[in-house]
Amino acid sequence: MAFDMTMALFRPALKYAMEKNGHGKALGLKMTEINRGEIKLTFPYKQDVIGNPLTGVIHGGVIVSLIDTACGSAAMTVLKTPAVAPTMDLRLDYMHPAEPNKPIYVEAKVYRQTSNVIFCRGLAWQDDKENPIAHGIANFMKVDSKSINFSAIAITQLRRLMPWGSSTASDKATEK
Amino acid sequence: MNAQQKLHQLEDWQASIAAARLEKCPQSLLEMIPYADFIGAQAKIENDRLLYWLDKRPTNIGNPSLPAIHGGVIGGFLELSAAIEILYSLEIAAVPKVVDFSLDYLRAGRYKTIYAKCNVLRQGKKLVNVTATAWQDDENTPIATARCHFLI
């Protein structure tokens, strides 16, 4: 396969945007694989997001966030120049509760795209991918949004590495 | 944890739910669920109906450049609201188990408070169907609607 320059630039930018900002950072998710139309991520168990205090099972809302993040990221990667694609809808089926104290693995794939819509599927599992916790589908709109400005991201990241580095507005927003 | 402790925990849980209903304080139910505190969900009674809201906070941002609230947070908030609606208004004690959840995003969730209301459309012996609607400025221009099934 030919070297994909766009993805080579987009991969670190997306990883940074998802892991180091806002809700992704709060959850502590890790993007383990980023390819065109395919995303894998891992969520370590966290007591802060328990939904059932009697059993320690995490809240279903976390799975919504994980599948939404994975599918949304996968949708971005299929665009010629990666840009944000807004979610139209999302549906989740919960097959069984997540076991406490174990990481959750999520995989999302774009299975079809038309001129206006990107169709994605996501799967969340713990021990056995054949016995998933949840399965979800999410559809995204292709809109004429501003494509992601790689040079601006690169400059921001370089600046942050400098001793006099100034933090960006989104950094300030995510500081607790 | 042994069976005795588990039983005690369940009794405490049931007592807290009964107290919340008696004192008309849905917020105390949210306080028992760590995830509610994680996203910052709150609830109160307004005109005999439960009103849920989610104040803006940096850890709920999805797209930092707009900034917009994470779609997953909106989903999680509505799923949580629907579960609280069941716990508070139906005569059940166990935590409702979510079976499926479907969400339509109508508008972007801007970086400000989100409100939500729920409706129990059907309560069967085992299954409950709940819808939830979220809005920001005006209840008539919702940002998202959800429907979910819970096993009780």
Image (cartoon, helix red, strand yellow):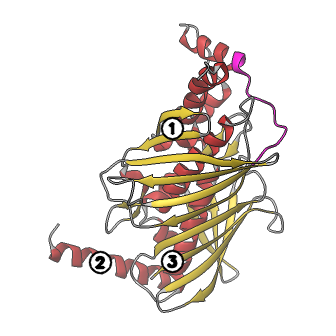
First-in-chain label (3 vs 2): 2
**Where does the magenta region start and end?**
A141-152
Residue underneath mark 1:
A25
Q: Chain of mark 2?
A: B
Q: Where, by quadrant of the figure, is residue B53 drawn? A: bottom right
For residue A61, the mark is none
Q: Residue at x 61, y 59 (%)?
A: B75
Circle 1: residue type: Lys
Q: Chain of mark 1?
A: A
Left or right of residue B25, residue A75 in this image: right
Evaluate whether label 3 is on the same chain as label 2.
yes
Q: Are marks 3 and 1 in contact (CB under 8 Å)?
A: no
**Residue A3 point in image, percent of width and height:** 61, 18
Q: Where, by quadrant of the figure, is residue A154 drawn? A: top right
For residue B10, the mark is 2
A133 and B128: which is toward the camera: A133
